Image: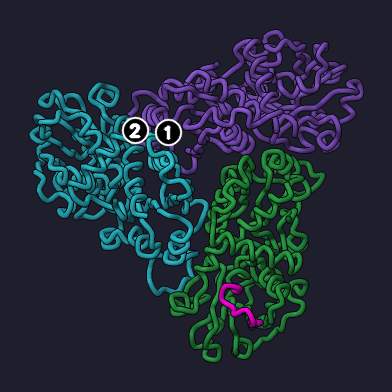
Chain colours: A green, B purple, C cyan
């Protein structure tokens, strides 16, 4: 039983969510009536493909009624600040909108990306936390300004599925080039969950791309990508923008794109990515189309991660 | 049993819709199979948050299948005029689209805002009535050019819930400042329903903001806001643009924004607004966050208003 | 039992789909549990009204869970080419997206319009076939670059409903004026299906508007519209852009707009159009609003065409 699902809590909770997700993967409709008469509202302030579909599917497999709202496109701009005179572009205050949504649904699921310009606001996970504060009901993160816990849970399920029971795998999170300024949420959460689940985590990136130490404390930071990759069991490829020089692109060095050549000392390494992936910019075709790739498995596990989370929240309401 | 739901019909119908809505509020799934095998199409020509969600929820609670179509975003521009050669931007004529929708659904629900520039077309509620004319099935207004009856029904439910049985409450509709030209639909319908339900209604606004007398006949019109508010049991706050000087903004006088100070001679007044509300422009934070506010209750009652209406239409099909 | 539904296969399959569709029209919920626990993903890369609604309705009538995704608006741009470095506007490769969708759904339904500029790519039905190639599950065309088979199946059902059993009807497909460059898909498929179903098909259009002969082989091509229409039982009105001078508008001659006058030697002709129709540009009001018009019947039959197709695919999964 969990209340909100916003971040890694503790290893016991993580392990039982992974166990439950794998049970749903084996038997997706085993609790087909658990959520009957209950509703989940999926609120998107940003675009989505996998998250939108997998969350709806997870809810339907539990018998719930999912209702999707694209606030950015079908609704209007929300005001987030306290006490302002709303005489500009924002049409409704978050406290009014979230209050209504809280009275319409049993669970809310929210996607709210960072600004990448207002570091303080992003670090407070301001928009996401306003929904928690004012809705008064359980809230699931569909990726907030700083975390993407459903992705990380799906990633942990995928690592579990590909790890012998006696093994403590070496996991490497490697930065990859990109042409746009990308949020830190996936990288932060992956580090948080991999460390929390007790894995041996190495993070490698060009100088200047240090993540918020709050999420990486306990990981080995290694600026030499080759050294970092040596002997890896799992290599998670992800771009992120700079954290210290907030939201900036400091490098697009193509040498950081992961290819087979990079894995010559990691023969058995499985390669992971949260998708969408920029092919031949972040990761080479040869890897994505070859036997190392777990990206489709990760994406499919998004369904069962969401189903385990929703199910655990339903236990408490 | 009702056919369409577009406006206030008579007090008996209004009272039985309010009774039914309160019964659904107490027991939302009491008719969970009533609508099985029936479909409602929710057509949005304009953005929506509460209306979109509450109508879907109401339909699901009756066992119906709701299908939402955002004609403005996922579809294309509709031609409304008769006999024109369609060699410009409109892609499909309302009579063809509405005919098809009539053959796809058991009930249609339509949102179609006014132009605020073509007064004659708005007054005829042209777009909305074209859907009624050509679909051939029951139609529910999700806010038309001149009325928002589901909102008013939810408002009447909220007033009923907050009124002692023996009391005939004093209801005040007060104009509030806004930065945009806002439709008359909520104000028109509130006046129509409050008068129709037999309440003592006072409407107050700056000179020049007279509403269409068709909706306000029987109300006290009082240009002195303080005098109007004295002894009020319910104060409904709403902006609207001018009706005579059609669609114009004649005043943004901040003195008309409702604050606690305005209610010093209405100590027990409850304050209402249909949402979305511009905080500290139409209504102060102190009221919205204080014990007088009914706005969340009104919003929640949108579900049960819609459920009572759909249920009453299902009785006839 | 069919695997994919992308084009006319053979007369036996077409006839049994028509029979099944008519059975569903008589009794829409006769297989209300057939699809329980199965999901269909409806992916729109382009706008839609009838197709979006009718496909969802068909799935719901079989007990399936439909999930609609507007990739163009709620998602992001897909990369279609092999081997490119994705350092421009495309965010995700079709092979990754389609792979994920294939693991999320039991059936996919895809709308993907042609470019009308890249003839080779359109002729290969490139985008649509990428979904088939990479999703690994049954795929239904909701209109591809070159075909619109659900529309044609609905058209064949409508012809069957309006034809005496002993009769082999004369069917005429006539080009009509339009102000925009319109795809060939509806015209191609109608020709393919009408010929495949053994009808006597005449196609008439201004010189230069010859369709791809792959779809019209066996039809009479007649540039004199009056001669073509003589004695017609069914007249299908449709604009398309040039095929040889690919995607170009060669004529907007209003004389080609079908009116009652054009049908003076086809007294009993029924008139068809797939909708949306540009009134008084492609087809006159007098025909669309008169007794000859089958357009509403065709549109309604879209539901039962989709239901027969989905049902036949469910037989194999």
Label 2 near label 1: C-beta < 8 Å? no
SS assignment at label 2:
helix
Q: Find residue C228 and report its horizontal and vertical position in percent.
A: 10, 36
In percent of the image, x 43 and y 75: which residue is there?
A289
In percent of the image, x 61 and y 57: which residue is there?
A306
Q: CA distance from mark 1 to mark 2?
A: 19 Å
Q: Quadrant of residue B20?
A: top right
Determine whether, in the image, residue B37 is placed left or right of residue A111: left
Residues in magenta, as a range? A159-169
Quarter of the image for the N terminus of chain A: give it: bottom right
**Relative height, residue C235 to residue A182 (above, below):** above
Q: Are marks 1 and 2 on the same chain?
A: no
Q: Find residue C90 and report its horizontal and vertical position in percent.
A: 47, 64
**What residue would you read off at disc 2?**
C300
Q: Chain of mark 2?
A: C
**Relative height, residue A57 to residue B234 (above, below):** below
- Residue A167: within the magenta? yes
Pick whichever, A22 or B246, lies toward us.
A22
């Amino acid at each position: 039983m969990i209340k909100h699902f916003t971040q890694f809590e503790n290893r016991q909770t993580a392990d039982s969510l992974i166990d439950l997700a794998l049970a749903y993967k084996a038997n997706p409709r085993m609790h087909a009536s658990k959520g009957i008469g209950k509703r989940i509202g999926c609120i998107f302030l940003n675009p989505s493909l996998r998250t939108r579909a997998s969350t709806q599917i997870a809810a339907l497999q539990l018998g719930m009624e999912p209702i999707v709202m694209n606030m950015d496109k079908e609704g209007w701009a929300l005001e987030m600040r306290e006490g302002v005179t709303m005489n500009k572009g924002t049409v409704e205050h978050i406290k009014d909108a979230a209050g209504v949504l809280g009275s319409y649904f049993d669970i809310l699921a929210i996607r709210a990306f960072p600004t990448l310009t207002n570091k303080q606001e992003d670090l407070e996970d301001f928009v996401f936390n306003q929904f928690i504060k004012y809705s008064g009901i359980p809230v699931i993160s569909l990726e907030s300004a700083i975390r993407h816990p459903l992705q990380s849970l799906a990633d942990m399920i995928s690592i579990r599925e590909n790890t012998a029971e006696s093994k403590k795998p070496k996991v490497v999170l490697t930065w990859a080039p990109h042409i746009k300024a990308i949020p830190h949420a996936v990288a932060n959460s992956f580090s948080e969950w991999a460390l929390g689940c007790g894995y041996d985590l190495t993070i490698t990136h060009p100088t200047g791309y240090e993540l918020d130490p709050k999420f990486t404390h306990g990981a080995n930071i290694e600026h030499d990508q080759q050294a970092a990759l040596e002997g890896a069991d799992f290599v998670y490829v992800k771009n992120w923008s700079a954290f210290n020089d907030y939201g900036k692109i400091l490098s697009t060095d193509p040498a950081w794109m992961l290819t087979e050549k990079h894995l010559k000392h990691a023969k058995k390494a499985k390669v992971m990515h949260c998708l969408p992936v920029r092919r031949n910019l972040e990761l080479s075709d040869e890897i994505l189309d070859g036997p190392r790739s777990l990206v489709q498995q990760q994406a499919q596990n998004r369904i069962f991660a969401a189903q385990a989370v929703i199910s655990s929240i339903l236990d408490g309401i």
